[in-house]
Every structure is written in C-alpha cells, then in structure tokens.
Amino acid sequence: MTGLTPSIQAAWRSAHGGLLRVLQSMGLRQPEAAIESASQRFWTESHQGRGSHWRSTARFAEGDLWTRIGVRHLGMLRRAARLLDAEPAFGRVVEWGCGGGANVVQIAPVAREFIGVDVSSESLRECARQVEARCDTPFRPVLVDVRHPEAALRDITDRCDVFLCVYVFELIPSPAYGERILHIAQQLLAPGGLALVQIKYDTGAWRTRPRRLSYRFSPGNTTTYPIHAFWELAVRCGFEPRYVELVPEDELDERYAYFVMVKPDIPGGVMSSRSSGRDQVTRPNGATSPTRSAPSDR
Ligand SMILES: C[S@@+](CC[C@H](N)C(=O)[O-])C[C@H]1O[C@@H](n2cnc3c(N)ncnc32)[C@H](O)[C@@H]1O
C-alpha cells in the first residue's frame, strides 16, 4: 500500500471497506470476544500516538487543532453546567479514553482532580506529561484492559462530578460494550453528576452501521448508534439525558452527537442541581420544586 498514490490508496480502502460491509450483510461477523481482543492488541502495541490524539503526531503538526479539541469540550461542559444550573466548578473529573491529553490540559486547570482512564499505558504517560506541563491539578492515570473495563471501579473509589468521553465510543468493540461503559460511568458519578458522552451516529444508511469485522482496518467505524437508541440506552443505564448537540462534521470526522446527561439523585427519579445547598430540584420537564440539598460527598 505504501508505494501507491494517495488516490489509489483511497480507492483501495473504499473497496476494502465495501467488501467488509458486503460480507457482514451476508452474515459474516466476528464474535464480541474476538473484536475485544483485536481492539486490545491495536491500542496496546507500541503506537507513538497513532490514532490517540497526541500533540506530537502529524495530524496536529500544523495549526491549533489539538488545542481547539480541548477548548471545545471545556466549552461544552461549561455550557451544560450553565443550562442545567449546576456548579460551574468541576471538582473531580474522569475522562474515559483520555489519549494524549488534548481535553485534560484544558479541563484539569479548572478541576480539583483529574482521572484519566485509558487502555494504553503509553497514552497515559503522554497525558500525564502534558498535564504536568500545564498545571498543578493532581492527575491520576488508570489503566484498563479493553476486555475488563469494569476493573476501573476497583481503582476509582471516590465519586466523580464529571464523566467525559469523546472520540472513543466509535472505537469501542460494539454497541453492547457501550452499555458497559455507561454503567461504569453511572457508578463513578456522584448523584447529580454530569456526563458528556460523544457517539458517532448511525443515519440508517448502510455505511453508517456498526462494523463487526476487521477492527484494525478502520477502528473509528466500529460502533455507531441511532441517536434515539443511544438516548434510550442511557435511560436504561440510569441516566437522565438532558439534551444532544449534533456535529454532522468536524475537522476529524463526521456524524458526532454529544449527549449531556445527569445521574439523578434518586435512581429513576428527579435530578437535583449540583450546587449543594440549593434547595431545589430540576424535574425532567424543567420545572423546579423545593427539596433537600444534594449529598456533599464530592
Ligand atoms: C482518538 S483517541 C481520543 C483521545 C481523547 N479523548 C481526545 O479527545 O483527544 C482514543 C483513545 O481511546 C483509547 N481507547 C480505545 N479503546 C478504549 C476503551 N475500550 N476504553 C478506554 N479507552 C479506550 C485509546 O487508547 C485512545 O487513547
């Protein structure tokens, strides 16, 4: 492939992708465990930032895209806090799949503590380097295996205020695996905690469906969801999705949906403002009524 011109490479990739989709529609699929193992291999072999948003990689060599990624997501978190009338200080933040730290360097300076979870120890080290060069906020790296993400719950015992996951859900082994991550997020968050989760959406068109073959060929097209299906999944996992921001195309890829969700104070019930001491809850319909303050375990 390396000796071919870029247009021939693109045509070859497109034909290869099409062939995989045809095989899949004929019923050929890899079992979940095989895709999980392929994903674990892909992210844990030495990669020097390939696909992991390291500042030093060719993709970010020119311009300020790397900085804009983090600034954009910090802006989204601030907007969510404002719209939900929540605490503007972020407290303890956890990012699932923190990569080379593009988000961490922007968000850690306004957080009390930052926990970065990733399946790549190389990326966790790079992320730590970036955040240490930027601010004094404590950064805690947590390494997980793709096959056992729930192990993070053993390492992170303190409740978090914010759960962030961007440019990761399209890479996870399957839509069902996303349910595991949402359950983990639910358990990591304090009651009233905020989650910002980005997915790649399925428009119903053939080429936008999840892929169950050949993870390595194109990891970023592995997992997609119809927008309403992800909303319903989040509810089943105990979240209150509040709104979705759509980004049909950005500098890196296409079809992104950002879900802003809250862990309710009472499972399946109403959501409190995150500002402890404010004697109000926000009901799903947006109305407010007096109640107890949010628990102060954060
Ligand atoms: C495209 S990078 C995104 C990095 C960062 N979130 C950002 O926005 O710059 C994807 C990251 O997700 C990590 N990753 C891949 N699969 C994962 C999984 N199942 N659980 C946690 N992290 C994962 C990769 O190691 C990589 O660091």
Image (cartoon, rainbow, N blue to C red):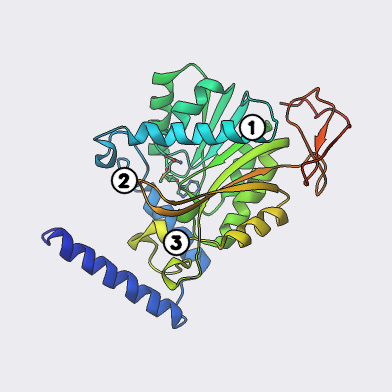
Q: Amino acid at mark 1?
A: Ala
Mark 1 or mark 2: which is in front? 1
What residue is at 45 percent from the left and 79 percent from the top?
A: 25
From the viewer's perspective, tell me whether residue 171 is left or right of residue 187. Answer: left
Is tag 3's residue or tag 2's residue first in the polypeptide sequence? Answer: 2
Graded by Cα atoms within 10 Å as few (under 14), some (14 to 19) or many (20 or more), the crowding at tag 1 reads some
Q: Amino acid at mark 2?
A: Arg
Question: Residue 157's spot in the image, x, y percent?
Answer: 67, 33
Q: Outermost residue, bottom direction?
A: 26
Q: Which residue is mark 1?
A: 81
On the image, the x and y values in percent for residue 212 come to: 46, 69
The quarter of the rendering in which ligand 1 is drawn is top left
In front: 68, or 176?
A: 68
Whether label 3 touches label 2, CB < 8 Å:
no
Q: Is residue 136 left or right of residue 93?
A: left
- Where is residue 250 drawn, in percent x and y? 39, 47
Could one spot residue 161 in this view of the protein?
no
Classify 10 Å Cα crowding around label 2: few (below 14), some (14-19), many (20 and above): some
Q: Secondary structure at mark 1?
A: helix
Q: Answer whether residue 107 is visible to the viewer in this image.
A: yes
Sequence-earlier tag: 1 or 2: 2
Residue where numbered disc 2 is placed: 50
Q: Position of residue 191 (x, y in %)?
A: 75, 36
Q: Secondary structure at mark 2?
A: loop
Label 1 vs label 3: CA separation?
Answer: 31 Å
Check disc 3 and report the residue beneath it: 222
**Which of the labelled discs sits on residue 117, or is there none?**
none
